[in-house]
Amino acid sequence: QVQLQQSGPGLVKPSQTLSLTCAISGDSVFTNTGAWNWIRQSPSRGLEWLGRTYYRSKWYNEYAVSMKSRITINPDTSKNQFSLQLNSVTPEDTAVYYCVRDDSGLVDWGQGTLVTVSS
Amino acid sequence: DIVLTQSPDFQSVTPKEKVTITCRASQSIGISLQWYQQKPDQSPKLLIKYASQSGSGVPSRFSGSGSGTDFTLTIDSLEAEDAATYYCHQSSSLPYTFGQGTKLEIK
């Protein structure tokens, strides 16, 4: 059974960088059948897909166009985890952030991290 | 981006009732449509993948149908534990998008 454990700060100041990590157990970040996603949820925007990383003989990253200039999703192969960095945050980035394994559907979800952007 | 529109937004139902939630896509997505259940303070849980395939461990009272632009989630004989918000999600093309959600209240 795959489990995803999120970690990272719950409070970020405006203009700073939001950083979250998702530790994977029960699967490998190198899986050839899945992808590793970040999704966020807020009352105003609902569920919003941010991007993903996956390995198919090499690493691929795909991002939502609305995030493309600010977002980085990276695998950490030494720790079997992946991360999210979102730069230049504003209060509109306040949301619950989820890491999610995608394998014929968004099958496994992290516990969610409420990130508040406020000074 | 593909827009998914669910109906209704809210429904109040009694136990043992049959519930139908619909999801309409702004363009054809084949069968690349999933359904999720989210209870308060929990992460979403996959119920149905590829429009009609049950997720792992999902009770048989949950079923899905449809293709193209129109999809349906059906809950036969509703139970109290089914009180939740239900979302559809398309995986036909990036960016992945979601419906706005349908909140089910149990009377």
Image (cartoon, grey):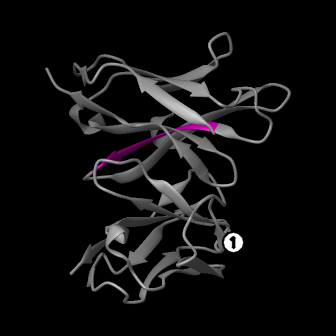
Q: Does residue A47 appear anywhere in the picture?
A: yes
Q: Which residues are magenta?
A: A36-42
Image: B22 above or below A43: below
Image: B31 above or below A24: below
Q: B99 or A90, which is in the foreground?
A: B99
Q: Is residue B107 left or right of residue B9?
A: left
Prevailing secondary structure of the magenta residues: strand
Chain at tag 1: B
Q: Is residue A39 magenta?
A: yes
Q: Is residue A91 left or right of residue A84?
A: left
Three-letter residue code for mark 1: Ile
Residue under label 1: B31
Quadrant in which residue B104 is drawn = bottom left
Quadrant in which residue A76 is drawn = top right
Q: Position of residue B17 (x, y in %)?
A: 37, 89
Q: A112 or A53, which is in the foreground?
A: A112
Tell me if mark 1 has few (under 14), some (14-19) or many (20+) residues whose alpha carbon lies within 10 angstroms of its own. Answer: many
Q: Position of residue A113 (x, y in %)?
A: 34, 32
User: What kind of element bears circle 1?
Assistant: loop
Q: Residue at x 64, y 19 (%)?
A: A80
Q: Residue furthest bottom?
A: B17
The C terminus of chain B lies in quadrant: bottom left
